[in-house]
Amino acid sequence: MVNTRAWIVFLDEFGVSLLPQVRRTYAPRGRTPLLRHRLNWKRASMAAALGYHAADPERGPRLCFHLKPGSHDTTGLIEVLEQMKAFYRGERVVLVRDGLSAHWSRAMRAWFAEQDWLTLER
């Protein structure tokens, strides 16, 4: 049963590439266009959390996110959750998350066990 005095927060992560996505361009017939860019193949990740208050919709939605180079691992996600803890400043949070393996690692489960402000849902 969901705590109606808590924020319901949906958390997800995704990766983005800094390499431009060019699919099609125009050039005079017979002259193949050459598109140049100065970016190399780097990746960045974003973890975003969208929350709303279950009992008081007048409080409005809250969005917080975290950007980092590379990809999120357990340590990076714990960083995100620590920032989220500060963002919600002691309020109760029900966190809805997906099945990413970093969410279920031994270190993550140990961190979750120490949190009294957080309830987990899948």
Image (spheres, helix red, strand yellow):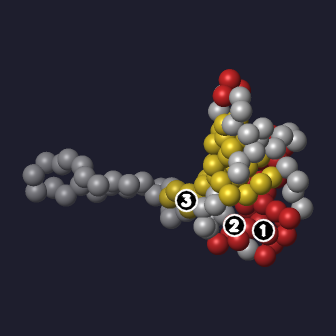
Please give the label number shown on residue 103. Answer: 2
Give how far apart the Cα atoms at labels 3 and 2 are: 16 Å
> Which of 34/90 is in front?
90
Q: Seen from this angle, which residue lies furthest top?
A: 58
Q: Earlier in the sequence, mark 2 or mark 1?
A: 2
The image shows residue 7, relative to residue 19, as above or below, that is above
Which mark lies nearer to you, 3 or 2? 2
Q: Earlier in the sequence, mark 3 or mark 1?
A: 3
For the point 52% across and 56% down, the residue is 16
Q: Seen from this angle, which residue lies furthest front?
A: 1
Please give the label number shown on residue 108. Answer: 1
Q: Earlier in the sequence, mark 3 or mark 2?
A: 3
Which residue carries the number 3 mark? 15
Residue 91 is at least partly visible in this image: yes
* Type of amino acid at the residue the image marks with label 2: His
Q: Locate residue 89 relative to residue 17 in the image: left or right.
A: right
> Which of 60/119 is in front?
119
For the point 55% across and 62% down, the residue is 42
Q: Residues within 10 Å of mark 3 (few under 14, many from 20)?
A: some
Residue 79, image quadrant: bottom right
Element type at mark 2: helix
Q: Are marks 2 and 1 in contact (CB under 8 Å)?
A: yes
Element type at mark 1: helix
Q: Residues within 10 Å of mark 2 (few under 14, many from 20)?
A: some
Q: Quadrant of the C terminus?
A: bottom right
The spot of residue 63 in percent (x, y) is 65, 38
Element type at mark 3: strand
The spot of residue 2 in percent (x, y) is 71, 48
